Amino acid sequence: MEVRELICIGCPLGCPLTVRIEGENMEVKGNTCKRGDDYARKEVLSPTRIVTSSVHVNGGELEMVSVKTKQDIPKGKIFEIMEEIRKTAVDAPVAIGDIVIENCAGTGVPIIATKNVARV
Amino acid sequence: MAKHDIVIIGGGPAGLAAAVAARKAGIQDILILERDGCLGGILNQCIHNGFGLHTFKEELTGPEYAARYIEMVEAEKIPYKLNTMVIDINKEKEVTVINKEDGLTTIQAKAIILAMGCRERPRGALNIPGYRPAGIYSAGTAQRLMNIEGFSVGKEVVILGSGDIGLIMARRMTLEGAKVKVVAELMPYSGGLKRNIVQCLDDYGIPLKLSHTVVGIEGKERVTGITIAQVGPDRKPIPGTEEHYSCDTLLLSVGLIPENELSRSIGIDMSRITSGPEVNDQLETSAEGVFACGNVLHVHDLVDYVSEEATLAGTNAAEYVRSGEEKSNCHVVELKAENGVRYTVPQTLDVNHMQDQVTVRFRVADVYKDRYISVYYDGVQISKRKKKVLAPGEMEQVVLKKESFGDYPDLKNIVICTEVE
Amino acid sequence: MKEWNFDAVIIGGGVTGCAIARELSRYQLHTAVVEREEDVCSGTSKANSAIVHAGHDATPGSEKARFNVEGNRLMGQLSEDLDFEFERNGSLILCFAEEDRPALQELYDKGVKNGVPDLKIITGDEARAMEPNVSDAVVAALYAPTGGIVCPFGLTIALAENACDNGVEFIFNQEVKKVNKTEKGYDLETVDGVIHASYVINAAGVYADEIHNMVSGRKLHITPRKGDYCLLDKEAGNHVKHTIFQLPGKLGKGILVTPTIHGNLLTGPTAKNIEDKEATATTAEELAEIMEKGSVSVKNVPFRQVITSFSGLRAHEDGDDFIVGEAEDAPGFFDAAGIESPGLTSAPAIGVYVAEKVAEKAGAAKKAEWKGTRKGFVRPEKLSLEERAALIKERPEYGTIICRCEGVSEGEIVDAINRTLGAVSLDGIKRRVRQGMGRCQAGFCTPRTMEILARERGMKMEDICKNAPGSNMLTGQK
């Protein structure tokens, strides 16, 4: 049996979690909501993260528009995703939720805008 | 002179939520004054996620969270002025503002809501010795240059201070290709949220050195290196523990200070602990009809609580404007922070005029394990709640219900404290 | 390789060099200032006590005594002519023990001999009546009503601008590497070329010995004497109204506590002899010393409100006096060397003296037209509300506040960049209009000031420097 101590990143509470792993079975303790249980299982099996950054905007009222992965992506893919984000620029106008990159770095997850940028 | 019922100073999360609440409480004539070129305040540069779980039950980035409130302000057609700086307010609630379009004008307000936010402590406040080259940034300045303007501020970085902005910037700079060599923290604990240590430092193998500080800055033109050293219990560097890091950038995340220059200019009573105004349960300052909320009142950990607090300030300011008369038959009780509780907001409570319940927010002085948070009315324990961990980086709260005061008609003070047993 | 030709070249754009340049601009001479940094006021002139000394410290008969008293006398009219900030706030020199009274009396006597007007020895109680925060231990004090405070940036920049307006050229980013005697005068080898000059004036601060020794057999030796300072928030600015000194000791005038002309509180300097002429790093020991010794003179100095600390190097010459005038064995080579405290005060007087000597040597007549006045910066803060409203109507950029702590508008920053000898760096803007000088120390206004500088100068953001080339703020585009 393996025991892992984690800090939940599901919300700012940061609950300390204890995960007991026995083969296929997992027991999570220390969480104060379901989010913590989900996080612990994912973190043990295949950890994921949301990636946020910003990309250049052409012809916008602002230089940059902030973006994020629409869902969480495998942790190991973070730098590949950043590589693609860095190469990207978009044309104004941009609205929150607009897809900036489809299927980023082969994850199947799109990069979406998190800010409205009007055209000038 | 222009006249408005409520003038809100600051169009960040506090100002926006206060405006929406005041409008919902029936006040038509509201004006938001924002010194920056857009609404939303510092949220605009906080492009990471983690905002809004309490308010919107989903995890948003800073700009998305701001956009929700900006949409509400737009939908309510609440007027605002951008690039507008308030240079003075006085007891008569005259607000002197300047901007490019209107020049210098004075506005007569019936109520004022202070929502100016906070600023970062600079290097000088820590008296860090060494040279003064380029490449020393407060974390928020670097954050703006990267996220809003799209520039790279450094390639090799040392960060002093493990407040949330420092942690977030450690990850942000790493993602943009910089090498963050170490985060040094003067205190024996981090001032940031635990989740940020996990997902901003641990994820990227960035070492966090607790009880360490910067003792030397090298480089004449641009930073070339930083020396850190361990500190003892007196927080003074221990000779012989120095470690040198070559780097081109030093980011400082060493604390936030409420921006209360305007509050002081009208002689509002200030708290020495929070550096914000002292307020009653209405979030009204010692100047009648002047309310405060958000980071200008006390530095928050989560924007969700800023919105909640600002909503209350907006509602109460609306009530003040509507009733227009001084309250009679007040029963004002002082809230005292004791034994590990550093301060409370509000600092006083009017038992006779309070809402059904009042949320009292506070921070603790140190990291405590397995302690109770207790409330006493005139020395009698009213409630206690056990907490596994209490940390200065996180805001705590207790809720006081109006009905609980029924048995205490002569109540003088309320004590909020931590207790071991 | 570049080549320049001038009648007279001043090495060093500090307060001394700029004062000489301004005075020399009265004469029919083609004059230049060559400065190794990107702007004037970039060495000792930018990091000192900002005090206009009354003149009682220097030994009677010394160059220091003479130029100090004369400089102090000139400062009032000069501040009106050149529109920089100066105030005679008066100074108090504190005596803490009965046995030190003779030393205080000696200081008084020296002052009288030097020609310092209106000096007075007062009791400890009188001192405390004037300054309630002065230490209870004080038994007596020397009161010098002619002591003052000045903006050292404002003074230096005003002198430079006025010199420039009157035809003096300024060559920046050119360190003088070598000075060679020629038939006509001197050749100054700089990093990028050579400057031919008939007359050379050495105002090179801590490097004045090296420059001097290139042409003269009578060697000078300057020791950089480092002084650290702590600058406190404007909230602490009223803690004292006068400049508070301690009775001088061997290494200088002790730790002073003074309001600055802009309403901050300044304490320092320490005095540490060092070897390295570039070592302007503050040290923890010296910062601690300031707090300890500053508290000896003045009660409850609110050191929690320190907003920045900095360090400057005084050019201390072994002979312990200013060396002003033509070098005996190098005709046409004039020194203004060893200019340590009271150098800032003395600069206007040194300027007049050296310019006269150079002009005399060159046989240069005065220009028919010379403009001795200069208009300073418009400071909206100092205007009445009506005047300020009118200004914004006419120049809307004065309505956009960039530096919120000091209330500096876009208009002032644009003025700092576009006027005579305008700023090319962030520090240049800061020293001209105080952007970033306040309690947040440029946290909020740095990005916006960079944008304005880039826009006005047609620069790329990445090329913007804090001060000298190489001090780039950014490391590229994202």
Image (spheres, coloured by chain):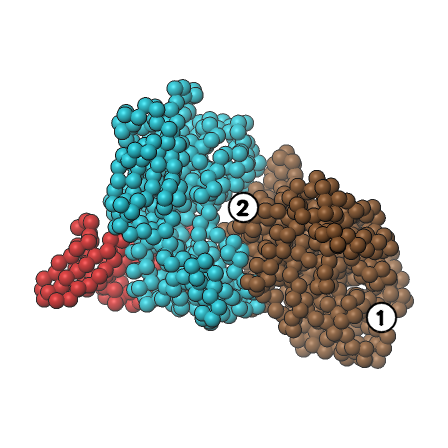
Name the spot of residue B200 as percent of width and height, x first: 33, 60
Q: Quadrant of the N terminus of chain C?
A: bottom right
Chain B colour? cyan
Chain A colour? red
Say whether residue C276 is left or right of residue C195.
left
The dot on residue C326 is: 1
Query: Can residue C146 be seen in the rendering of this structure?
Result: yes
Say whether residue B222 is left or right of residue C311.
left
Q: Nearer the viewer, mark 1 or mark 2?
A: 1
Tell me which label, 1 or 2, sits earlier in the chain.
1
Residue at 46% x, 51% y: name it: B120
Q: Which residue is mark 2?
A: C404
Name the spot of residue C234 as percent of width and height, x first: 59, 46
Crowd rating for badge 2 (residues with CA inside 10 Å; few <14, some 14–19, many 20+): many
Q: Amino acid at mark 2?
A: Arg
Q: Is residue B359 placed above or below C462 in the rendered structure? A: above
Q: Amino acid at mark 1?
A: Glu
Please state the chain letter of the residue tagged with numbered disc 1 in the rendered image.
C
Q: Nearer the viewer, residue C408 or B207?
A: B207
Residue at 57% x, 63% y: name it: C285
Name the spot of residue A19 as percent of width and height, x first: 17, 60
Chain C colour? brown
Which element carries disc 1, helix, strand or loop? Answer: strand
Please state the chain letter of the residue tagged with numbered disc 2 in the rendered image.
C
Crowd rating for badge 1 (residues with CA inside 10 Å; few <14, some 14–19, many 20+): many
Task: Quadrant for residue B101, please give it.
Answer: top right
Residue at 38% x, 58% y: name it: B188
Seen as rendered, the residue at the extreme front is C99
Which element carries disc 2, helix, strand or loop? Answer: loop
